[in-house]
Image: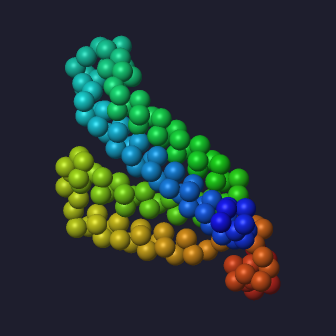
Amino acid sequence: MTLKTLDKETRCAIKNAIFVVLIVFGNTVGNLMLAISMNQTPSISSVTVPNYFGAMLTNPFFLAGTFLSALSLLAQLTMYTWADLSYVLPVTASGYVVTAILSKFFLQEHVSMFRWIGVVIISFGVFFVAETPPDTKHVDATHPDAQQVEGVSQ
């Protein structure tokens, strides 16, 4: 079975999933690498400005983190061409969950119970938004999201 033989809805779902993964992976792993690089960079108050920027710009974690962050941004901008902002940002908020996990295990950060509760709440929000169509401007008129509310069409 090839991608072309799948129905339009399935192809759109696959495309959304790929781009959400690119955005979340690029953002979370990129930020992790940037945090590692900045932990290895001397304090800006302890060195000259050129030495500070030199240390930062030659750090492989900084370069990889910057690349992954840029990849995430480009994927997010691309996703805006077919999906609503009110869909893209909440769905990609799953990155906050991944960030908490990466921070705990790779940066040895203490993630308090209240932060974990926040992560769980975010997860529920991501789930609810993911159940809606990504594009409400061009949704099928029979879909529940396309129904009129008190005589005002969406």
For the point 22% across and 67% down, the residue is 113
Residue ranking furthest to the front: 1
Q: Tell me where residue 93 appears, x and y as whole percent.
A: 47, 60
- Picture quadrant where residue 17 is located: bottom right
Viewer-proximal residue, 24 or 38?
24
Viewer-proximal residue, 152 or 135?
135
Viewer-proximal residue, 8 or 88?
8
Q: Tell me where residue 6 appears, x and y as whole percent.
A: 70, 68
Q: Tell me where residue 88 appears, x and y as whole percent.
A: 58, 60
Q: Is residue 91 left or right of residue 151?
A: left
Q: Is residue 118 above or below residue 57?
A: below
For the point 63% across and 47% down, the residue is 77
For the point 52% across and 75% down, the residue is 128
For the point 64% across and 53% down, the residue is 79
Q: Is residue 21 above or below residue 49?
A: below
Q: Is residue 112 above or below residue 72?
A: below
Q: Quadrant of the C terminus?
A: bottom right
- Picture quadrant where residue 37 is located: top left
Count of numbered circles in the view: 0
Q: Is residue 120 left or right of residue 8?
A: left
Q: Tell me where residue 32 appears, x and y as whole percent.
A: 34, 44
For the question of whether residue 12 can be seen, the reply is no
What is the basis of the colouring in this image? rainbow
Q: Quadrant of the N terminus?
A: bottom right
Viewer-proximal residue, 67 or 40?
67
For the question of whether residue 109 can be seen, the reply is yes
